[in-house]
Image (tube, helix red, strand yellow):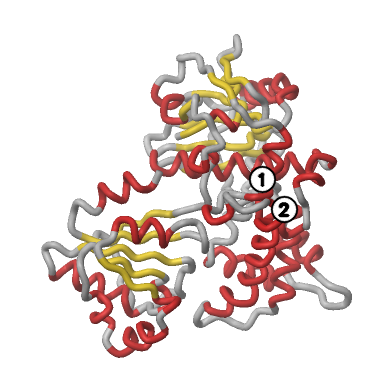
Amino acid sequence: MIDTELAEALQYPGAVLLEGPRACGKSATGRHHAASSIQLDTDPGAVTLAALDPARLLVGARPRFIDEWQLAPQVWNSVRAAVDREDDASFILAGSAVPADDATRHSGAGRMLRFKMRPMSLAESGHSAGDVRLSELLATPADPVSGASDLTVPDLAEVLVRGGWPGLQTLPLRQAVNRLRSYLDDTARIDLPRLEDEPRRDPDAVLRLVRALGRSVATEVSIAALARAASAGDERMTDATVQSYLGALSRVFAIEDQPSWGPHLRSRDRVRKAPRRHLIDPSLAAAAVGAGADRLLTDLGYFGQLFESLVVRDLRVYAEPLGGVVRHYRDSAGREVDAIIELPDGSWLAIEIKLAASREDSAAESLLRFVSNLDASRTPPPTAMIIITGGQYAYTRADGIHVVPIGALAQ
């Protein structure tokens, strides 16, 4: 999905930044759109050169692709200067970590266009029929939906465990799972230590925290609860350590919280502000806790958590090109909505996520109860209300709520 946006951006002078986790496809995307490239993580000589003369790394046919640029942060200012100086400057930078803030590094405002890449959605990996499009729900919310998903529940379990990683799609499932476990180990032992200006972190403690996040995926688990779950024996992890580790995991794009949404209410109930916790792909949560596809079919509660995280991942992929942000809602009276997509013009969608299509009625009741409690004079009604399920058919109910299988959804 990012290819069209990137191609359009490269028609004009400037630079684009591709950010996202390792192995999500940034390098392949950058090379596809570039006329020349350099890869800093496999060329130590280039990193040395960057410390001496970073402008030399910019020499080459344009667009020039610089992969893993954060290993030589000096490149940032050199790219900015080239964009200021050259009428036809065209660069693509890609990074799988966010460098520490540096007062000498210009923000890039007005010169650098940022794109966030994530593991593939089901539409991108070919697992969604794409009969129902999020953009159409926003543009013509009154039109009924129709379509079908080819994914069975066992299919969904395998899709969840494999994840949206381009390089794992054709591997046997067991091999894909083994590589995801190695991915987590590399994150703790290689990626985090590469972050400059950061304190040393215990890799084993990081992995315990990742397992705690994996068990609590798609919930509003607190910092204190994570600290308790990640402690080992007499070695108690402090809240401050958890905060520090979460910040580092966010900087290497291993996790991505789902923020809360705060509309105006008719009642005096308070909106909860805690985020919901997600790893960047639900497959990492499954790998962290050792949950294979067979186990998910016997543990439907955890399957439901992972399914919700999968849907949130896909909603982020589909909504971001539209300028949308995926949030969630919970208030002190217990009303909650699994996903709110908020657009820049103030319009929004309310979405409930249910693995079992049989829970459609309770999900619809929850959405209607939530909307009835909004202060209509200050918060407009949703453009559409949607129930995303692991079922087969897409349709619009008599109350106007759309029921959409995740295997039928696309941008």
Quarter of the image where the C terminus is located: top left
Mark pair 2, 1: CA separation: 8 Å
Please state the horizontal and vertical placement of residue 126, each as a whole percent of the image. 52, 38
Q: Residue at x 64, y 70 (%)?
A: 245
- Residue holding disc 1: 160
Most foreground residue, 123 or 108: 123
Q: Is residue 274 visible?
A: no
Give the quarter of the image for residue 362: top right
Give the quarter of the image for residue 45: bottom left
Q: Earlier in the sequence, mark 2 or mark 1?
A: 1
Give the quarter of the image for residue 91: bottom left
Question: Looking at the image, is 132 positioned above or below residue 143?
Answer: below
- Proximity of marks 2 and 1: CB atoms separated by less than 8 Å: yes
Residue furthest top in the image: 398
What element does badge 1 sit on?
Answer: helix
Q: Is residue 238 visible?
A: yes
Q: Label 2 sits on what residue type?
A: Ala
Q: Along the horizontal axis of the image, is 97 left or right of 69?
A: right
Q: Residue at x 39, y 59 (%)?
A: 18
Q: Residue at x 77, y 52 (%)?
A: 291
What element does badge 2 sit on?
Answer: helix
**Which label belongs to residue 320?**
none
Residue furthest left in the image: 87
Quarter of the image where the N terminus is located: top left
Most foreground residue, 403 or 398: 403
Please state the horizontal and vertical placement of residue 14, each as a whole percent of the image. 22, 60
Q: Label 1 sits on what residue type?
A: Leu
Most foreground residue, 72 or 238: 72
- Residue holding disc 2: 286
Q: Along the horizontal axis of the image, is 303 left or right of 316?
A: right
